[in-house]
Amino acid sequence: MVLLLLAPTVCAQTVQIPRVSDLRFSAGVQLVGIYTGGAQADINGDRRLENVANRFDFSARRARFSITGRVTEGLDLDFRIVFYYDNLGRDRFTGGRSSPGDGTVGVWDAFWTWHAQPTWAAITMGYFRPQIGRENLTSGFQTNSSMDKLPTQVYQRAHTVGRSSGREMGINVGGLRNRSKWGLNYNVGLFDTCHAGVTGQTSGGDLWAPLVVSRVALSLGQPEMQSYGIDYQVNYFNRRKGATLAAAYARQGANNAFHRNETVSFDLLANYSSLNLDAELDLLRRRTLSLVQYTDRVWHIRSGYNIRAPHSTWLEPVVAVVKFRGDRLSALYPNGRDRQLDVGLNWYVRETRVKLNVHCTRQKGSGVSNYSDGATFLRGNMVGLGVQLVY
């Protein structure tokens, strides 16, 4: 009888459920209206391009719902789970770089970060972006380009992980150390790719090799982040005077798709009061199963300038240039050419939480690229209006 009376007490003392603090629910949406002109498509299935009617398309370009929090009680663990429902109502002949949506809901991010040591050791596990390529790593709600993010990330993601979201299951160790005039940020990750674009077979093939990714970023002047994280931003609204230069490398060995796959990436972010400047260069190298080696190249440079406006709002004129060149031996984009010029104006009503913008995007290409596959479509040029709400 005594044992029965004591048992609940013992269990209550030994079984403790960690508390979750700072639990937050948030959402974001980008509503866009895009006028597309000059698009062409293979209408009859005879691989002959024909003009399609110019059109104005209204859609929800991005939509997110997220849950974030921190597990306490002796365990410094952050977590984030994000769901998406993108491209609702998108016309398939719109000139943007995304795909039409059909109301599909899915998991965008799902990861947990344990701060094992306050400065040098943060361990992130789950489904997230490998740390390579600034455009890839920066949320579409934080960039200052047009209705779509720059296509720099499209090529890098297709080459490195295959999946258009850029996400993959893995584990990453990183750290951040800031001094008075400089800062250093590092990341090293190991990922298990399963997309057919980089494994050769759906959900993985009989041959397997891990994807290893590393990135080192040096900040001069004011740092780009005060505490470690795997998210980045572009506009600091005149609160930063500093520059960050990063180099990253990804490598995956032999599987059913290739003999070796590599990505070499360099990126820059400079903020000096009103000026916001970022640039990226990605070298996409692959050695095929037939031991043919090639390199695709993509780069961009983008600049914006903050102008104070009434009622504590900001205006930012922006211009961006992107260029992609696919090798003639490329497995994904043989002889591909893609060029984009984007000019626009962003109006930040509550910084990135409430933003309105108008952008004009001129683009052209040839061969097999994200602009045109050389046979069934050409995207055309765009003028777009957008509203962003994050709450």
Image (tube, rainbow, N blue to C red):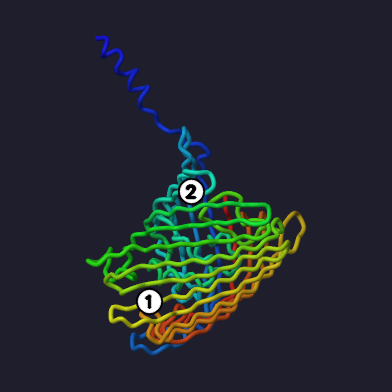
Q: Residue at x 53, y 54 (%)?
A: 28
The answer to whether residue 28 is left or right of residue 100 is right
Q: Nearer the viewer, mark 2 or mark 1?
A: 2
Residue 135 in view in this figure:
no
Residue 2 in view in this figure:
yes
* Above or below 29: residue 89: below
Relative image position of residue 227 (x, y in whole percent): 58, 49
Q: Quadrant of the N terminus?
A: top left
Relative image position of residue 360 (x, y in whole percent): 61, 76
Residue position for label 1: 286
Q: Which mark is residue 74?
A: none
Q: Which of the two residues, 391 or 300, is positioned nearer the viewer here?
A: 300
As shown in the figure, which amino acid type bears the numbered disc 2?
Answer: Ala
Classify 10 Å Cα crowding around label 1: few (below 14), some (14-19), many (20 and above): many
Relative image position of residue 308 (x, y in whole percent): 76, 60
Quadrant of residue 92 within the rendered picture: bottom left
Q: Residue at x 54, y 76 (%)?
A: 299
Q: Secondary structure at mark 2?
A: strand
Residue position for label 2: 121
Q: Residue at x 39, y 84 (%)?
A: 334
As shown in the figure, which amino acid type bears the numbered disc 1?
Answer: Arg
The answer to whether residue 215 is left or right of residue 311 is left
